[in-house]
Image (cartoon, rainbow, N blue to C red):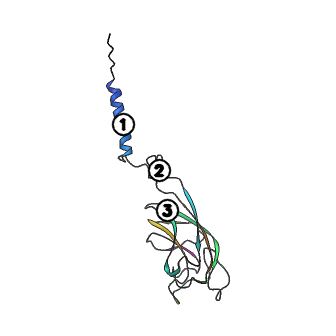
Amino acid sequence: MTSVIRTSSRVRLGSVVAAAAVAAGALGLVAPATASAATVTKTVFVDAKTAGADGVFAASGVDVAAGSTVSVTATGQASFDPGYRSDTAGPDGFSDLNCTDSVAPCVLNGQPFIALIGKVGTGDPVVVGAGPKILAGSGPLSFAVNDNIDGFANNTGGFEVTITYTPPCTGLFCFGS
């Protein structure tokens, strides 16, 4: 006696649909998920002697994706020109002394000396201070200490900067919201 095994057309069709869905996901042909990757916290040291010297900001190693934001807080003490002023200031800078370009351009004119300054990509620099400060834009996140751009050699101290951000989810297994 010969046996005949019949396979239901519904089973075959279901298998084909499932295989197609897996293949489409693997090829990135399905709508992207709305989830984000895990939140990341990174701490960097911004040296008052170098970050902003000659107008060059110090890289943080964080790249901000378009449409994303980062939260920044800072602690620490820094000072400038001990012959002029011997005290130190925190990341908000000296509240009684704004940086002007009377001697040389400042990292951010009209803002407190020694204040922590941040920027994203080619965006405008802003005072971050002690924070928390939310920054947006697209590109590398960088920092400076506000001083005349040629006056950093006699600065001391710096700031511990904590950056919190959620990078976009780009993996195949991003689900949820």
Marks 1, 3: nearer the viewer: 1
Say whether residue 170 is left or right of residue 11.
right
Magenta stretch encompasses residue 121: yes
Give the residue number, with chain letter if any, for mark 1. 19
Give the residue number, with chain letter if any, for mark 2. 35
- Can you give x and y, in whole percent of width and height, for residue 81 in the image? 62, 86
Give me the residue at 36% from left, 41% from top: 23
Q: Residue 69 got which mark? A: 3
* Residue 131 occupies quadrant: bottom right
Amino acid type, mark 3 = Thr
Q: Residue 101 got which mark? A: none
Q: Which is nearer the N-term, disc 1 or disc 3?
A: 1
Give the overall secondary structure of the magenta segment.
Answer: loop
Q: Nearer the viewer, residue 24 or 71?
A: 24
Residue 78 in view of the camera: yes
- Can you give x and y, in whole percent of width and height, for residue 47 in the image? 59, 74
How many dots with numbers?
Answer: 3
